[in-house]
Image (spheres, coloured by chain):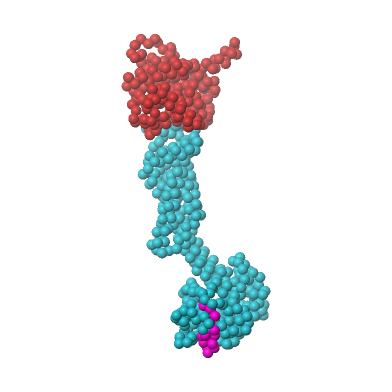
Chain colours: A cyan, B red
Amino acid sequence: MNTAGLLRVAFQSLVRNAFRSLLTMLGIIIGVGAVITSMAIGSGAQAAVQAQLARLGSNLIVVVPGSSITGGVQLGAGARQSLKLGDATAIQADVPGVAYVAPMSSTNSQVVAGGNNWATSIVGTTPSWMSVQNWTMSQGRFFSDDEVKSGAKVAVLGATVQSNLFPSGGGVGSSVIIKSVPFTVIGVLAAKGQSGFGRDQDDQVVVPISAMQLRLNGQSWLGTIFVSAQSPDAVASVVSSTEALLRLRHALTTRAPDDFSVRNIADVQAAASATADVQSKLLAGIAAVSLIVGGIGIMNIMLVSVTERTREIGIRMAVGARERDILMQFLVEAVALSCAGGIIGVFIGIGAAFGTSAGAGWPIQIAPSSIVLSFVFAALVGIAFGFYPAQRASQLNPIEALRHE
Amino acid sequence: MNTNGAVHNVLRHVIDVRDLHKVYRVGAEDVAALDGVTLHVDNGEFLAVMGASGSGKSTFMNIIGCLDQPTSGTYLLEGDDVSHLSRDALAAVRSGKLGFVFQGFNLLSRSSAIENVELPLTYAGVRAEERHERARKALEAVGLGKRLNHTPSELSGGQQQRVAIARALVNDPSLILADEPTGNLDSHSTQEIMAIFHSLNEERHITIVLVTHEPDVAAWSQRIVTFRDGHVLDDQPTPARASTEAHA
């Protein structure tokens, strides 16, 4: 019998037992729906975490001073005064795969503008900082390399600082006083909001690193060096080269511990995405189990159907059906059941994902691959669990089948 | 003449059965359902098979219908040895050469008359339009040209059996096997059905082997073979029909 004939016979048989067919498909419907919903929620969560980490700066590597031991008292990371501006310059010059290097030194201070004042953190850095941390300007401009070289007294305000010092907006061109030193405001950063760690990233004032070191904190060492790699693939090699370079520059002997620490945002990102990945795989695994249970339901009903239709099988064999014709007839029926269940499940899964998103406010992301995957899996379940009943039907003895009541 | 005679001999016999044995194992015992049956049925013959139940006539019908295989012996169908073919090869023989008519009609209950008649052609790989056309002609030949789309439940017993005959007829078989085709029918329908078999045999020269318990039905045939205990007990031309009722 040809394919169209097989499909027609299978379709007729399923429609004649519409309610039973629907109940049989239910397992597959729930399974496919669960796969799609869980994968939509899982990848939605993953995308949200990734987006948050991406805001921290893509391919970001952070170099901080190591801890220091003074008289047996071990102080925390960053207590050492080991990182110098020269280290930043050397990383930029000597480490392959580096896109930007931004040295950073910071202090806290009261900032005064006219009648308003605001306590905030002052960050000294170079123009690379913009790229490294993915900042954009909302007003004015950032300072230039020349202004860093000359130690110009210019400042860029975070959005929170601007709104506190200049409640009516603006402020570019005005003067602010930091630690008794007047700085000219040349720009305002576009607001970023809270960081992933709950800190208001817009509550800061950015000045050239030279102005910071010369006029504000008087320190020659750096708090942090931000390094961004050219690509995610380059991150690992940049980390190891940076470590080697700094050990050399700091003249550390083989046994001496690092007096700095290189941290990799990509690692944090990978850990976060691995967590989300495990969660969505777990959910998909549970869903796969329900698909298999659905397959067992199909097998059960197909076995019942073969028994019920033994006489029909006998008639078909008597008029010339070969084993393969009978096998295909029942196999196509099982696959039609699972595929129809799969299609309904896809729609229910998409609906449930949007429902969850609307109800619980979770981010969702429906990947076409999850739809294709679950549908193909459902079809395979139909073939796998439909084969045994179909095989049994095809092996019936025509004489006994014809006598069956 | 001799060589021609041999060829002619083979072709003359639609069924050529030699020393057929069929042994079933029932529990620990072997039961011989057929115990050395030798029989020839000529092309165009109308044969009635009679015998009590358990005489082996059903087993014989199953074997010549290629639904079962003999334990030993040979069965030549139109000169081809079909006694030891595979299941699929037997299915192909049924599809190409045989038509079945059963006591219980054995129609697909949810399919229309024409769909039932088309069924053998579906498995023979005939295209849809030709299938439909041939099925329609077969139904017209048995007088059901106006009931193509009725399902079996909408037809009387006699009409259902006529659909079954159309189904047996549709693939132009060499041989139609009828297993008590009138067993479930009233006497009027029995006459109708037997008249159809008679005309198929007379006009189309289709060989018919028919199992029956009823002498009235057997009277339509040309030759009566009686089975008993797995043997052919008697093999006689049908006596001239005395009763005029048989020709009603």
Relative to the observer, which residue lies in front, A285 or B50?
Answer: A285
Vertically, is A387 above or below A122? Answer: above
Q: Which residues are magenta?
A: A175-189
Tell me which residue sits at (64%, 75%) in the image: A91
Q: Is residue A373 visible?
A: yes
Front residue of A322 and B169: B169
Indicate the quadrant containing the C terminus of chain A: top left, top right, bottom left or bottom right: top left
Q: Position of residue B76 (x, y in %)?
A: 52, 21
Q: Quadrant of residue A237?
A: bottom right
Given residues A80 and B111, the one toward you in this image is: B111
Does residue B240 lie above or below A112 as drawn?
above
- Residue at x-position 42% and y-position 49%: A344
Q: Residue A218: image x %, image y %?
A: 58, 87
For the stretch drawn in magenta, the main secondary structure is strand
Is A313 colored magenta in this rendering?
Answer: no
Q: Is residue A178 magenta?
A: yes
Question: Which residue is rendered at x = 51% and y = 54% of the image?
Answer: A369
Question: Along the horizontal axis of the image, is A76 left or right of A293?
Answer: right
